[in-house]
């Protein structure tokens, strides 16, 4: 395309506010068209949701695995939320991707203790979850074995997801996609809180109706 005079712009998975902002601004610049008002409203809904819920996600540690581009987008959004993508692993990730991930970590104070693992598999992730535990795991269906073995709660995002129905109908790109990801993360956090505080008079210090 570039050989025929068309500018080519390479972008990462647009997950979250910043990633989607960049995508839409580039599209607007290339086409000369304004960003639709409806998308601005959609952006506002995501920003409001983040403001309402960031206290529950801030400081939480996550391990992510999957497609390199998806891992990058999810890690970027977690940093945006004040969370730590402590382990980011992509079996088909290369050196260039690893360098890009490290650059992302270096751009945020929440990326200080985060590490990228290119060319590693879920057996390596399993070891990491034992030796350097995190609060939550994000990835596809195959992570359920890691959840069972290590006790790390799994948030199902990515491909494939065989053990839950209709996940493919919900986008993760764009502002609405970011809102979907935010809700899935929050639901799993609250489920974990309930599960860990449900014994009457012993651990029910946070078994609350309202979150």
Image (cartoon, rainbow, N blue to C red):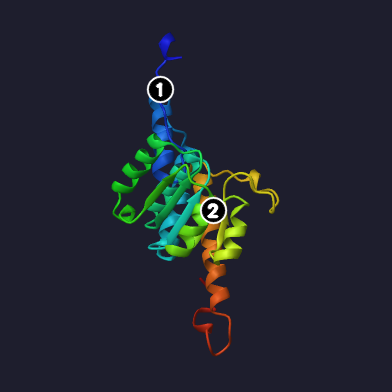
Q: Position of residue 167 (x, y in %)?
A: 65, 48
Does residue 202 appear in the picture of this structure?
A: yes
Looking at this rendering, what residue extends furthest in the top direction? 4
- Tell me the tag on residue 22: none
As rendered, which of 118 and 20 lies closer to the eye? 118
Residue pictured at 70% horizontal, 51% vertical: 165
Kindly identify which residue carries mark 2: 123
Question: Residue at 30% across / 50% down in the picture?
Answer: 108
Element carrying mark 2:
helix
In percent of width and height, residue 87 lies at: 43, 53
- Reply above or below: 88 against 200: above
Tag 2 near tag 1, CB within 8 Å: no
Q: Quadrant location of residue 72? A: top left
Nearer the observer, 32 or 199: 199
Q: What percent of the width, then of the height, locates residue 166?
A: 69, 48
Front one among 111 and 51: 111
105 w.r.t. 38: above or below: below
Figure check: 200 above or below 157? below
Where is mark 1, residue-wise?
Answer: 30
Q: Which residue sits at x=36%, y=53%?
A: 114
């Amino acid at each position: 395309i570039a050989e025929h005079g068309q500018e080519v712009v390479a972008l990462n998975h647009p997950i979250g506010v910043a990633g989607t902002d960049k995508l839409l601004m580039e599209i607007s610049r290339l086409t000369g068209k304004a960003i639709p008002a409806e998308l601005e409203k959609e952006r506002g809904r995501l920003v409001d949701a983040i403001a309402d819920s960031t206290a529950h996600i801030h400081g939480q540690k996550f391990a992510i695995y999957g497609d390199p581009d998806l891992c990058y987008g999810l890690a970027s959004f977690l940093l945006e939320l004040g969370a730590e993508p402590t382990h980011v692993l992509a079996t088909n990730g290369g050196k260039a991707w690893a360098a890009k991930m490290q650059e992302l970590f270096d751009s945020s104070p929440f990326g200080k203790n985060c590490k990228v693992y290119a060319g590693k598999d879920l057996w390596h992730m399993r070891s990491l979850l034992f030796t350097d535990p995190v609060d939550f795991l994000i990835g596809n269906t195959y992570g359920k074995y890691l959840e069972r073995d290590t006790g790390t709660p799994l948030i199902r995002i990515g491909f494939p997801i065989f053990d839950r129905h209709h996940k493919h109908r919900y986008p993760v790109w764009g502002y609405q996609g970011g809102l979907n990801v935010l809700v899935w993360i929050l639901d799993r956090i609250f489920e974990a809180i309930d599960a860990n505080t449900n014994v009457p008079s012993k651990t029910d210090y946070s078994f609350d109706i309202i979150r």
